[in-house]
Image: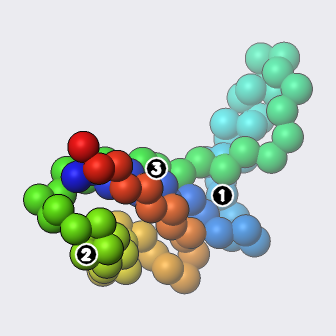
């Protein structure tokens, strides 16, 4: 089983990297609005049960992969 975790800054949290990307794209002539920069974490899991796998990934996120105070997390599970 594979999990894809999307981690982004929460609304209201400053995102200087997103602001820099937006400014650079605008200088290149692209008509863009707000940009938020996050990260993607792909995880191969040995768990066969999707409920257990989701629980494990949520725990990974809360303990290491994301700061729940300032980041939001989206988890997608793909059963192979």
Residue that appears at 51% across and 66% down: 73
Task: Work out whether residue 12 can be spotted.
Answer: yes
Q: What is the crowding at mark 2: few (fewer than 14 residues within 10 Å), some, or many (at least 20)?
A: few
Q: What is the crowding at mark 1: few (fewer than 14 residues within 10 Å), some, or many (at least 20)?
A: some
- The disc, 3 or 2, on the residue closer to the chain's N-terminal end is 3
Q: Are marks 1 and 2 in contact (CB under 8 Å)?
A: no
Residue that appears at 88% across and 26% down: 31
- The disc, 3 or 1, on the residue closer to the chain's N-terminal end is 1
Task: Work out whether residue 64 can be spotted.
Answer: no
Residue that appears at 54% across and 82% down: 69
| Residue mark closest to the camera, 1 vs 2 | 2
Instruction: Return the residue nearer the eye: 37 or 24.
Output: 37
| Residue mark closest to the camera, 3 vs 2 | 2
The residue carrying mark 1 is 15
The residue carrying mark 2 is 52
SS at circle 1: loop
Q: Give the numbered dot on residue 39.
A: 3
SS at circle 2: helix
């Amino acid at each position: 089983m594979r999990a894809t975790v999307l981690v982004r800054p929460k609304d209201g949290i400053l995102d200087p990297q997103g602001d820099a990307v937006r400014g650079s794209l605008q200088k290149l002539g692209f008509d863009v609005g707000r940009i938020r920069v996050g990260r993607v974490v792909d995880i191969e899991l040995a768990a066969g049960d999707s409920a257990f796998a989701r629980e494990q990934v949520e725990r990974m996120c809360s303990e290491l992969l994301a700061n729940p105070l300032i980041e939001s997390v989206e988890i997608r599970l793909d059963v192979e």
